[in-house]
Amino acid sequence: MRIEFSGIAKRFGDHQALKETTLALPDVHAMAIIGPSGGGKTTLLRLIAGLEIPDRGELFIDGERLESGQAALLRHRRSIGTVFQSFNLFPHLSALENIVLPLEKVHGYGRPAARDHAMALLERFQLAPHAGKRPAELSGGQQQRVAIVRAIAIRPRFLLLDEPTSALDPEMTAEVLDVIGELRTEGRDLIMVTHHMGFARSVADHCLFVGDGAILEEGPAEEFFAAPRSEQLRSFLAKILKY
Amino acid sequence: MSTSESPQSHIDVGDGAAIPTKSDVGLFTAWRIAFVGSIACCIFLAVYKPDPYLAIFKFVPDGILVTFKVTVGAILLAIVLGLFTGLGRISTNRLVNGIASLYVEVIRGIPLLVQIFYIYYALGRFVRIPDLFSAIIAMAVCYGAYMGEVFRAGIQSIPKGQMEAALSLGMSRRQAMRHVILPQSIKVVLPPIGNEFIALLKDSSLVSILAVSDLLRRCREFASESFTYFETYTVIALIYLVITLFFSKLIGIMEERLNAGK
Ligand SMILES: Nc1ncnc2c1ncn2[C@@H]1O[C@H](COP(=O)(O)OP(=O)(O)OP(=O)(O)O)[C@@H](O)[C@H]1O
Ligand SMILES: [Mg+2]
């Protein structure tokens, strides 16, 4: 995918969450975004997701300018899969219905086709036995895997993941990262905010270091981790790799 | 940040609980004493002092039916009105939001009895509709405002992540509201709606000041013919008590079922 930020900025109240940012990434397939808490990672991801509208500047994805009209935003969101830190499955629906609902209501599937498609995906990710369960009856790892399936079921151009494992314990983290790695192997494009440096290093082809509302450093994954240029990134990596 | 995004299980809207909680257990709960006691009183009075009590009991069923009609009709209409008011109150559309908020503020600032008179006579100026319907509309307009606050609180109790997730999957706000937010709010708004139902059941006695022969008016008619004021009002109080206690228990049970089926 091709991503271009041209002077985008976002402010919440009197807090500048993202300072004027310009960046062109002509050919990324897996991008990791890392950085300290409150630095603006989520804000950046939400802007790409079309869940937030920039105050200024323009955003181009695959050469297409992201318009801020409701209809355009709707179209944009329909073409992108988003996975949240807190899963955000719909608690009143079973795992299967969570996936079926958007397919049926938004993406023009008939009910049987939606169910078949959802069921096939659940099977592929070893979630078929849980199809009929409500989110509350699933472990955190299972919930997040269902959420990932729900996001890819709508056949998005690419996937956005915001710290998808932060709410999980280590064992479940592994099962979710495995799924994401698998998706990447299949050739699915993704952008992911993560604190797992090892995973970022092995999966991503491009990395962004975001802090204090700005992209402080960016570059191909190998260089980024092996030879960080900025002092901030060096000390951030040192801190995070310490434990 | 919390990981389990289950909706808040309880919201506090209204003037206080009219429904017994689960902590009211045991053989001699206040509810049982009141319910059994009031039924026993009715039977006792009817058997031992048939004159005038039996006559009163025979006279009132029509009134009970009217009271039910007013209550059920008004609550259904109030729910519809309340749903739209609640949606209006959280709308980002200035005009819609303004109308809904104004409605709630105005209604909350006027005594119910005055509203009933006002709406009844205001309606009467423009359209000819049966008194019963005027009474139902008057009650519904009033309770719709309170119900609007119940729905607003219910919708706002659903975690923000739910709307976000729905939008991220490509749903419009309207679709997200209909398929994701409202179905989850039902569990949250049902208890306060039950509460409003009980309150409305009691307040429906106010329509007796109009030409609607509800339970209270019917009894007043009887009393003024037979000059048995004390006896008649005793019966009215007992009947309201039995009905109210019955429904509050029923709603309490429904609520428990709902929570059990989480
Ligand atoms: N909707 C909002 N309203 C007000 N302030 C916000 C909002 N969203 C984000 N912010 C603020 O913007 C700043 C950047 O937030 P953001 O969520 O993008 O950081 P982050 O890098 O994702 O942090 P974390 O690692 O904690 O998730 C924070 O200071 C946050 O408080
Ligand atoms: Mg974040």
Image (cartoon, rainbow, N blue to C red):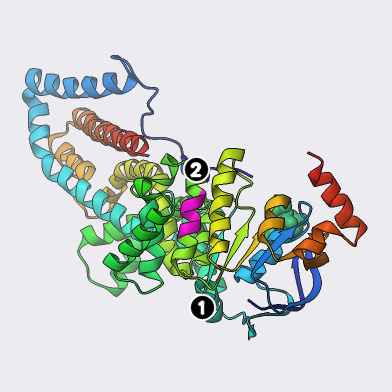
**Residue B199 in the image, given as x and y percentages of width and height:** 35, 42
* Residue at the (48%, 64%) spot, across then down: A152
Tag 1: residue type?
Arg
Q: For numbered disc 2, what is the local secondary structure? A: loop
Give me the disc on residue B8: 2
**Residue B157 in the image, given as x and y percentages of width and height:** 51, 49
Tag 2: residue type?
Gln
Q: CA distance from mark 2 to mark 1?
A: 32 Å
Residue situated in front as seen by the camera: A104 or B48: A104
Q: Chain of mark 1?
A: A
Image: B63 above or below A181: above
In this rendering, would B129 be left or right of B102?
A: left
Asked whether residue A47 is in view, the answer is yes
* Residue at the (20%, 42%) spot, across then down: B215
Q: Quadrant of the N terminus of chain B?
A: top right
**Residue B142 in the image, given as x and y percentages of width and height:** 39, 55
Image: B17 above or below A226: above
Q: Was residue A146 drawn as part of the magenta stretch in this picture? A: yes
Q: Which segment did they paint magenta? A: A144-149
Question: For mark 1, what is the residue?
Answer: A75
* Residue at the (7%, 20%) spot, across then down: B47
* Residue at the (50%, 43%) spot, across then down: B8
